Image: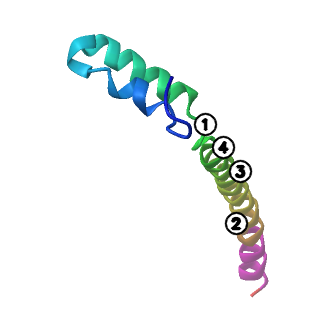
């Protein structure tokens, strides 16, 4: 049994990376990465921010195309009136 508050350091200290082989080490690292949820909130915020950015850019492009047509009509009307 490990020491209280040791966090399992006694069990991990007995293992050697060289003895278990590189595939076991890779498998353990991938498993640890999959279980890690520390960056999930930041990733979700980044995805939401990207989605909001895309919607904003699309809206602005649509608005510009509509407004430029209106200004073109105004320009044509003003030049014909002179």
Task: Name the element at disc 3.
Answer: helix
Whether the magenta-drawn stretch holds residue 74 is answered as yes
Residue 68, numbered label: 2
Instruction: Mark 3 or mark 1: name the one nearer the start of the chain.
Output: 1
The first of marks 4 and 2 along the sequence is 4
* Residue 75, quarter of picture: bottom right
Question: Upstream in the sequence, badge 2 or badge 3?
Answer: 3
| Mark 3, residue position | 55
Task: Find out whether the residues at labels 4 and 1 contact each other: C-beta distance under 8 Å.
Answer: no
Marks 3 and 1 sit apart, C-alpha to C-alpha, by 28 Å
At a point 66% along the width and 46% down the height, the residue shown is: 41
Q: Mark 4 vs mark 1: which is more N-terminal?
A: 1
Q: Main secondary structure of the magenta part?
A: helix
- Label 2 packing within 10 angstroms: few (<14), some (14-19), many (20+): few
Q: Position of residue 50 (x, y in %)?
A: 62, 49
Q: Quadrant location of the C terminus?
A: bottom right
Foreground label between 3 and 4: 4
Mark 3 closeness class: few <14, some 14–19, many ≥20 residues within 10 Å: few
Mark 2 vs mark 1, CA separation in Å: 47 Å
Neighbour tally class for label 4: few under 14, some 14-19, many 20 plus, Cα within 10 Å: few
**SS type, badge 1:** loop
Task: Residue at 63% x, 44% y: name it.
Answer: 47
Distance between the alpha carbons at the discs numbered 2 and 3? 20 Å
């Amino acid at each position: 049994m490990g020491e209280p508050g040791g966090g399992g350091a006694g069990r991990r200290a007995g293992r050697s990376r060289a003895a278990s082989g590189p595939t076991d080490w890779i498998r353990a690292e991938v498993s640890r990465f999959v279980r890690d949820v520390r960056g999930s909130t930041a990733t979700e915020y980044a995805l939401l921010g990207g989605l909001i950015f895309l919607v904003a850019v699309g809206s602005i492009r649509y608005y510009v195309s509509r407004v430029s047509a209106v200004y073109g009509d105004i320009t044509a009307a003003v030049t014909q009136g002179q």
